[in-house]
Image: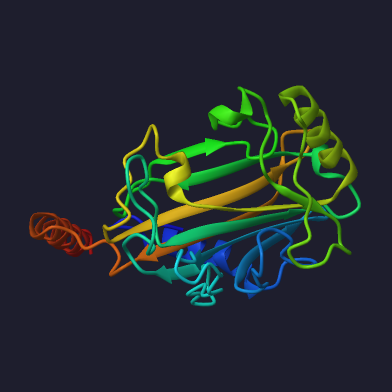
Amino acid sequence: MKFPVIQSVAAVALSLSALSAYAADANVTNNVITGNGIANGGFTIGNGGGVEVGLRARERHDLATNSPTNVTGSNNNGTYNQNAGEPAGFGGAGQNRARWNFDWSINTGTANVGAYTYRLGMDFDPSFGTNFQTFDPIKGVNPNPAAGGLALWDHSFGNNSTAQSAGVEAFGLTLAAALADYNSLMANNNLVQNSWNYDFFDSAFSFDPTANGNYSIFLEAIDGNNRVVSRSDIEVVVGTGFVPEPGSLALVGAALAGLALSRRRKQ
C-alpha cells in the first residue's frame, strides 16, 4: 500500500487493483467486542476462504474523557488520516504513545481461531519506504514480560453473537492457568480482536509519535497448507504525511527527467 516514489504504470495499476479487492469503510462481523464503547465501522476488510480479517486506524481516547472518540479518519479506500502527537494524559518514562491506535479483527467463520496461523506486519518507516516488523499476533510469543515468554495475549474472544464490548480475555491465577484458558478460548471461538498502539511494539524499532509520516499495516490469515487465504492492508497517514527533504525531491526530479530522456531516445 505504501508506494515508492518512482513506480511504473503497471505497478501502480496492480496496487490499485489489489486495493479495490478490499471492502473499505465497512463493519466487521458481527460487533467490535474489545474495549469499552468502541463502535463498529471504518474497517478495511479482506475476505477469503471463509475468513474475514479487518484493520483500521482510530483516534485513541485521552485520560481526560476516558472514552473512545471512534474517529477513524477513513478515506474509504484503505487509507486513514490521524493526528501526530501523544494523547492527553499520557507521558513519562517509557511511554511514547501515539494519538491513534490500529484495531484488528479476525473472524474465522465456521472454523475456530486456532485453525489458522496469522501474520501481522507493522511498518516502522515513516517515509515512503517500509520497514516491517512481522509476527503472529495469535500464536506467536507475546513480547510483554507479563506473558512469561508464552503465546499468551490479552485479546478479546467471542463469536458472531457476542455483544459489543463483551469479548472475553484469558484469565488465570498462574501463567499456566492463563495459558490454558487462552488456548481454550482460541479453540472454542471464531472471533478475536484487539486494539494496539505502536508504542507497544517499538522496543526494537524507532518510533516518534510526534512526527509526520506514513505507516503501512497488513494482516493475513494462513491455512494449513501455508496459503494466505485472507488479507487486509491499510496505510495510516499521520499529520501531514511524509514530506521528502529538498535534496530527496531533487533526486526524484532528476530520475524522472532521466527516464523521460531515455524514453525519447528509444522512440
Q: Is residue 211 above or below residue 59?
A: above
126 sits left or right of 253 in the view: right
User: Quick check: 119 left or right of 244?
Assistant: right
17 or 200: nearer the viewer: 200
Q: Note whether 110 is above or below 256 in the view shown.
A: above
In percent of width and height, residue 255 lies at 16, 56
Where in the figure is residue 113, as x and y percent of width and height? 81, 44
Residue 84, image x and y in percent? 32, 64
Q: Foreground: 131 or 99?
A: 99
One can see residue 10 in this view: no
Above or below, comparing residue 125 to residue 177 in the picture: below
The image quadrant of residue 44 is bottom right
Q: Picture coordinates of residue 37 (x, y %)?
A: 66, 70
- Examine the image and state in which quarter residue 175 appears: top right
The residue under the point 44% across, 49% down is 198
State left or right for residue 55 relative to residue 110.
left
Q: Could you tell me which residue is drawn at 54 percent across and 27 percent down?
A: 145
Q: Residue at x 13, y 62 (%)?
A: 253
Identify which residue, 56 or 219, lies in the foreground. Answer: 56
Given residues 86 and 45, the one toward you in this image is 86
Count of numbered circles in the view: 0
Q: Quadrant of the C terminus?
A: bottom left
Q: Residue at x 78, y 60 (%)?
A: 166
